[in-house]
Image (cartoon, rainbow, N blue to C red):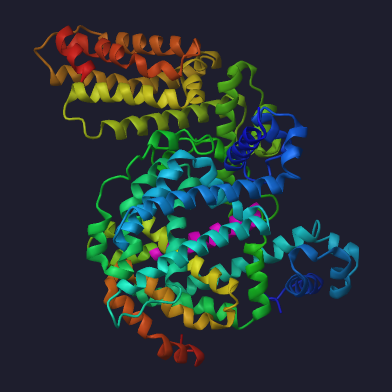
Amino acid sequence: MGATEQRERILAATAELVAKRGYHATTVELIVKRAGLARNTFYEHFANREECLLACLDETALRAGERIAAAVHAEGEWPHQVRAALVACLDYLAVEPARVRTFLVESTSAGPAATQRYDDALERLARALRSGRTLAPSGARLPDVLEDSLVGALVWMVHPRFLRGEVSEIPGLLPRMVRFTLAPYIGAERAAEYAGVEAPAGEDVDSVAADPGAPPDEEPAAVGALEDPVTLRPLPAGRHGMSPELVARDQRKRILAAMVRCVGERGYEKTSIAQVIALASVSRQTYYQHFVDKEDCFAAAYDAAVARIEAHVEAAVASARDWPELVAGAIRALLDFLAAHPDMARLCFTDTAAVGDAFAARRDRDNRRWLEQLAAGRNHHAGARDPGDGIEEALLAGLATLITRRIRAGEIEQLRDLSAELIELALTPFLGPERAHSAALA
Amino acid sequence: MPSTVSPDPERGRISAALIALVVERGYDAVTLEPLLERAGVDRVAFESRFADVRDCFDQVWDEMSASFVVEIREAFARDDQWREKMRRAAYYTLRYFTEDMVRASFFLVGTLSGGDVATARRDRLVALAVEFVVVGRQDLADPELVSVADAEGIAGGIYAALTAAVRKGEFAELGELVPQLMYLAVLPFHGVEAAQEELGRGPADLERFRRGEL
């Protein structure tokens, strides 16, 4: 491996780790492990961790800058240039989400030199934006701080979405960003024309979602008792002035996320409270303030996971026009979600049996909602065929078995391949094989 | 010096000494010995109250920030109209930052010192600004015209403008910032005329502010 490739791997590993864990938890040891290189190799390229981070930030600024310059160059009119620059930024975010997160969110907690990089980059953008002042109607006064503020505003539209794990929402902000940036110069109405509504060209929501530091979170935040690995990061040490309720909520979230992760990795039986509290960075005492035992915590994690799945499915089928579309959409959304959240897939499908009888009631309760959905097919398609009593339960058990088998076989990512088969299975008793088949292919 | 009267005089002296030292020497340069000397307390007195200098900084900053938040919320609550609320909160912030420059510097150091704690503090302050901006949606026939993302942008923009002014050493000019910040907040909600109006209010409002009417 050449020196350039080594350096590239170190920088990529650094960005991924910092985006996921923050700068302070990212050690040289972790970086070399992730990059698959020897410790010595790291020190051949960088004197220390800070130098490495700064190189990573510089490279990110450079790459983003090149993209912006190329995009702007291709446009004539200033408002188009602004739009093109924003599209370029969002495109870059889609390609290298970890680097962008490291730059926009993590750099300011990584010491004065890193903060300076951040400040400088924002200032460069603000200066570039000032050329728009020539377009403002003569006589219109603009605030001196306008550009600093606009650039800050754009960053802060993105920033909280990184923190909340809503990275997939960011590309959709483009029209608002364009309107927001242009309105002071050319007025709200013309700004809206330039904003348009289409998503940025070349946008790749999936690759954003694949960011290890910010996994997909398509669900409303309210269901977010269980989120992504980011939530495993503890609150800053020391007195942070957060209300006790906020702290407790954060602790609980971290414990639940840790339980999901542990069960996902080693199964319920082999998961110990010690592992969960270590991963969640909470004390044993804190754990017991929230949960009476392991099962209690598992049950809460299960409930939270089910709530997330249901919210995801509900959102996916909101626009279903009829019952077959609703069932097909629900199955696809379920499989999508499970494929994207392997830990939750294992927790909900393969580990509940290990927990004991008390848990069966919980599963029954959740299954009932799915049964009702399936049973609705009888009303909508009365006359098509009489499926016979108990068919819903049999179907649900069949669907669960097929999904569970794949998960046990470690084929979670391939779960989506099952969708046509499962949709057909679910619809056939109600619609007959032909209509079920065509619904599955729709 | 500290904004709150401490029922514990030794603690009060430690806070005051810490604030002065941080502002004079910078956050990283403050160590225990000079702090004890300045406060006129011994190590035992210090350690019965704080784990270390860092803990002392965190506690003092958090107390200061907590009282700031309570007071700015009160200021925001006093008027009925959103624009008035925002303006009063902005001038309150201005007063907070200009009437005691040492306190202001210390406050800013807390959010700019780097590290996850400082970042969390900054995020909380921006979140407070978002909370205030979002109230402006009640004035709109269609609240979706300004989304939460826009409100987050406006609040972040205000924060960025403030810190840019501080960074460029325009600290004393903060008074002139208020109309500009109001322009930024008002524009997406009420359009360019209203925003221009805010910008034009500057001198008169500043005069009222100096007379203590704002």
Per the image, is A65 magenta? no
Query: As rendered, which of A176 and B91 lies closer to the eye?
Result: A176
Using the image as rendered, state which of residue A178 and residue B208 is in the foreground. Answer: A178
- Vertically, is B81 above or below A396? below
Residue A405 percent location from the top left of the image: 44, 9
Given residues A397 and A63, the one toward you in this image is: A63
Q: Is residue B117 depicted above or below A386 in this figure?
A: below
Relative to A309, residue A191 above or below: below
Q: Residue at x 38, y 62 (%)?
A: B134
Please tell me in which quadrant of the rendered image residue A270 appears.
top right
Q: Is residue A395 left or right of residue A211?
A: left
On screen, residue A239 versus residue A163, left or right, reads right
Specify the farthest residue to the left.
Answer: A383
Q: Position of residue B52 (x, y in %)?
A: 81, 58
Total numbered circles = 0
Q: Magenta segment range? A: B116-133
What is the magenta segment's predominant secondary structure? helix
Residue B37, quarter of picture:
bottom right
Q: Based on the picture, tell me whether residue B119 belongs to the magenta stretch.
A: yes
Q: Is residue B168 visible?
A: yes
Residue drawn where x is 48% and y is 35% of the image: A215
Residue closer to the observer: A263 or B181 = B181
For the question of whether residue B3 can be seen, the reply is no
Q: Residue at x 34, y 66 (%)?
A: B136
> Does residue A268 appear left or right of residue A200 in this picture?
right
Coordinates of residue B193 in the picture (x, y in percent): 27, 77
Residue A298 rendering spot, x and y as whole percentages? 55, 26
The quarter of the picture where the N terminus of chain B appears is bottom right
